[in-house]
Image: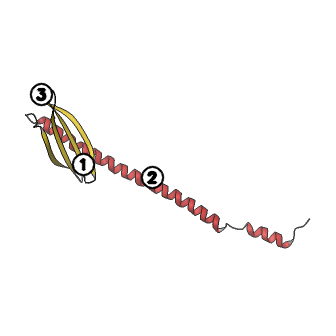
Amino acid sequence: MKQPQRFQELRSSRQQGFTLIEILVALSITAIALMAGAKASMSLSNNSDRLGNILLAQLCAENQMIKTRLEKQMPNIGESDFTCAQGQTEFLGKVNIQPTPNPNFRRMDVQISDKLGPILSLSTVVGKL
């Protein structure tokens, strides 16, 4: 049985291209995938910057602890502030010296922060030489 001419024309015209809805769905899927990739890339970049700042802050804290250990006398009890430049970043530091049950030792807490807030906190015990 032969199909009418008009039915064959309609059938072939439907198979010639994509509909507007199919194109919009494909573009939406592509846009979502690209946005997810961009967000992941930005997150990796931010984490890398943060880890670099933590490393530089640790250098500042350790330098302050070593400086205190190299002094000939026991550190005074109390708080003091200092600044530390590492790389191209200026860090703010706070040293807190507290007594311990043993009078030959003092607890030293060093907190490093930047403009955004605290980054790192290190603690140690300093004794008499």
Give the label on residue 40, or none: 2
* C-alpha distance separating marks 2 and 3: 51 Å
Q: Secondary structure at mark 3?
A: loop
Residue type at tag 2: Ala
- Tell me which amino acid carries mark 1: Ser
Q: Position of residue 122 (x, y in %)?
A: 24, 39
Q: Nearer the viewer, residue 107 or 38?
A: 107
Name of the residue lying farthest toward the right:
1
> Separation of disc 2 and disc 1 at Cα?
26 Å
Q: Which residue is under mark 3?
A: 104
Q: Nearer the viewer, residue 72 or 79?
A: 79
Q: Residue at x 64, y 68 (%)?
A: 20
Residue at image mark 1: 113
Task: Please tell me how crowded label 2 is: few (under 14), some (14-19), or many (20+) other residues with Cα within 10 Å.
Answer: few
Q: What x and y, as percent, mark residue 128? A: 11, 29
Residue farthest toward the top in the current orientation of the protein: 102
- Numbered disc in front, either 2 or 1: 1
Q: Give left or right: position of 10 versus 55.
A: right
Q: SS at mark 2?
A: helix
Identity of the amino acid at label 3? Asn
